[in-house]
Image: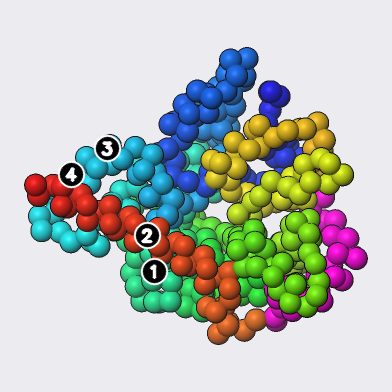
Amino acid sequence: MRENNLLEALVQVSPGMEIWWDSSPVIFKNWCRKLLAKADAGDQQTLKRQFGRMYNTENPEESLFRGVTTNPSLSLQAIKDDEPYWKDVTFGIIKKNPGIDKESLFWLLYKEVVKRGSDMFLPLFEKTNFREGFLSGQVDPRKSFDKETMLKQAAELAAINPNVMIKVPGTKEGYEVIEELTSRGIATNNTLTFVLPQLMDCARSVQKGLEKAKANHVDLSRWRSIITHMEARYGDLGGLRDFGTEKGIELSEGDVRLAELAIFKKAYRLLKKNNYPSKLLSCSLRVGPTVDGALRLWHLEEKAGANIVVTCPPTFIDEVIHFPGQENIHFIKDRIDHEIPKDVLDKLLRVPYFERAYAEDGYARDEYNAHPSLVKTAQQFSKATDDMVEFAGKCIADFSR
């Protein structure tokens, strides 16, 4: 096992790049324990050193992880990681709120998970003068089309800790919320975003909100704007290959990865060209494709040199740490500025699903809510939120026995 993992190598050639932990930080210690338990004896000390660099409690400003993305779905995973512990926490909330219903209990429990996770990154937030160390707390995914509820929940989440950034969906209503929150000086992370029109709509919405904030002399010292591109959720979950098949075009795994990267790279160029204050975040990453018999990491390789955020779930970090053939992975400075091959782009542009996603004006704001990737992702996140509500309901039933 190499001393510095591939994520560390990527950051070394990418000034300004931030690696974020894509889960609740409360599971980090247990995740480390599980990885050590299955590691070869000869790798355990190297792993321990890597873990110490990922989340450095003694010198937070030296940590590999510079922030956190989370949501109710990931919070449910944190609860399942140590269910007896969180059941006791939930019982404590019930004791303080006699007669509470399961929906209200879910929301208080979710806020508690956000509180404990953001507490862990407050030292980094303070050490970096409020520029890093944010934790994204998402509004209820089931309310992605309800502007007023999202604004209310955003205010509650923002009040938990100064380093809580509000995760807002890329729905028609979501961009109205992002503009309003920005005007109040509240940090935001735009999620459920898959196509270039959404990414640029967010950048413009943030700019408008920022202009209002400055005109009203709002304190912006703790404000940031992040725009997430959910890459494989566009290519895989959204069904790019199926849309290609409809047009008689066969797309390989590599074509799908390059389609996702083409959208990301174009957004990156446009944000720089127009001096938008938002920073792109890359998520929903995948290992692959296999090229000439060798497994690659295009989702990371093609972003070398980028001043962006890359958020990684524990499962993906595990894959990267134990990636086979690491000697074949070379992070080339400024690779982010390289175009994808013209022949691949020309083929992709023959698929309307991609053509529209790649054009700045490919979708109107009124069309976002019906995009296949958004619909399917919102359904998945809503289902996970319902599961967390049911956990709360079970705790109420068990408490009253």
Q: CA distance from mark 1 to mark 2?
A: 8 Å
Query: Could you tell me which residue is drawn at 62 percent across and 84 percent down?
Result: 364
Horizontal and vertical percent for residue 142?
39, 69
Residue picked out by circle 3 = 84
Residue 314: x and y in percent read 54, 40
Callout 2, which amino acid?
Answer: Thr
Magenta residues span 335-362
Q: Earlier in the sequence, mark 3 or mark 1?
A: 3
Per the image, label 4 sits on a secondary structure element best described as: helix
The numbered mark, 1 or 4, whose residue comes first in the sequence reads 4
Picture quarter with the N terminus: top right
Tell me, yes or no, whether the two marked residues, 1 and 2, touch with CB atoms within 8 Å: yes
Name the residue carrying label 2. Answer: 385
CB within 8 Å, label 3 to label 1 = no
Separation of marks 1 and 4 at Cα, in angstroms = 26 Å
Query: On the image, numbered disc 1 is attached to which residue?
Result: 142
Which residue reaches farthest top?
42
Which residue corresponds to the image point at 43% horizontal and 76% vertical from the top-left? 145
Residue 45 drawn at (x, y percent): 58, 17
> Amino acid type of disc 3?
Pro
Determine if the magenta segment contains residue 300.
Answer: no
Q: CA separation, marks 4 and 3?
A: 13 Å
Which label lies toward us, 3 or 1?
Answer: 3
Amino acid under disc 4:
Gly
Q: Earlier in the sequence, mark 3 or mark 2?
A: 3
Q: Mark 1: which amino acid? A: Arg
Disc 4 designates what residue?
Answer: 92
Q: Is residue 5 above or below residue 90?
A: above
Residue 243 sits in quarter: bottom right
Outermost residue, right direction? 343
